[in-house]
Amino acid sequence: MEIEDFVILRRDLHAHPELRFQEFRTADCVASHLEAWGFEVDVGLAGTGVVGTLRGKGPNSILLRADMDALQLQELNDFPHVSRNPGVMHACGHDGHVTMLLAAAHRLSQRKRLPGTIHVVFQPGEEGGAGAQRMIDVGLLERCKAGAAFALHAWPQLPVGTIASRPGPIMAAGVRFIVTVNGRGAHAAQPQLGTDPITTAALMIQQFQLLVSRETDPNVALVLSVCMFQAGETDNIIPNQAVLRGTIRALGSQAIANTMERMQQMAHLLARANGAEAQVTFHQHYPVTANNADAVTVAFEAARSATHKPPLAVVESPPNMTSEDFGFILERMKGAYVLIGNAGASNRCSAMPLHSPNFDFNDDLIPIGARYWEAIVDRYFESEMAA
């Protein structure tokens, strides 16, 4: 396959996005290509996960991971490969992640000799489903037994040709919350006869922000975002219930634990003060994604050695408050999570923010990412990490 074929493949994946743990078409596409190139292929891990293995001569092995799932979002682009699945969109570049790793797998399969074994992991359910943990739970790391793991993510804040990472935390820990406020419904013109859950929930939104601005050390990175407010069905009835949903992100687990405890206290006290009741639940816990320093060195050396003109630029990334379930893997083995620049003049959507309805992966990245993956493989097997 040539690069043009991978561009066609990427755009096909973009046009047919699939939500977490529903990536059946994507997984079939990945598995069929890997089998055709001579990989040992396991399918169905954590439902739709795919692992391809290419065995080399040496005793060492490496794990390379790409995520496959799309987001529940209506795409607003108008190019020919726009999503054909209403309300579902590849707005985080996972279509490109799959394609870059497949392109690298194809190139590696053409080598006559490999210095070690390569495991390419195509993971479901990164977007809120903790798919990495589910794959671990069904034996991913025992099956692969790799010495290090690496992942790439397209990054619209960086220009094409740029590689960024850092030792230590690069992505925040995260947890999602649901706050349910139960009141008593009434006629909108007779609010004194009911207990309004909307006004109580609105007070909670304001007070929750004080947990960041007034109860957390300003030197501690912490974000609390209420992203959904659901209440009522019409404009003349005070409803029985209001629901808030959102997320907490921090670069340390203690800050999240403290915030969760105070949210519980604050929600119950505010509800009681207004004659309502509140229930707070937390779910989808993601750990900090913390890079191993030696693995970051491998990643940066790979960027400098990759066959790309002009040479890839290497920068140290600040920690990001987004979360990533690759952290589950990095809790158990050495590795690095690496950002690769997506913004470029050839695609006006490539600099749009991640999770924007106008985002698109930049196809100029496909050959760059493929060669960079190759360079990571080569540099890792040459490094002391693999010794």
Image (tube, rainbow, N blue to C red):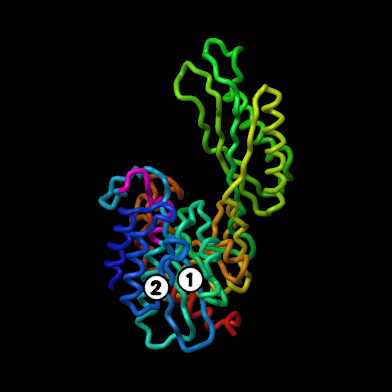
Q: Residue at 58% across / 72% down in the picture?
A: 295
What SS does tag 1 mark?
strand
Cβ–Cβ under 8 Å for marks 2 and 1: yes
What SS does tag 2 mark?
helix
Q: Is residue 349 above or below residue 339?
A: above
Residue with the mark numbered 1: 64
First in sequence: mark 2 or mark 1? 1
Amino acid at circle 2: Ala
On the rendered image, what quadrant is the C terminus found in? bottom right
Residue density around tag 2, few if under 14, some if 14–19, many if 20 or more, within 10 Å: many
Residue with the mark numbered 2: 104
The magenta-colored residue range is 85-96
Of 300 and 129, the residue lying toward us: 129
Amino acid at circle 1: Leu
Q: Is residue 311 above or below residue 250?
A: below
Of 302 and 10, the residue lying toward us: 10
Residue 205 part of the magenta segment:
no
On the rendered image, what quadrant is the N terminus found in? bottom left
Q: CA distance from mark 2 to mark 1?
A: 10 Å
Of 76 and 285, the residue lying toward us: 285
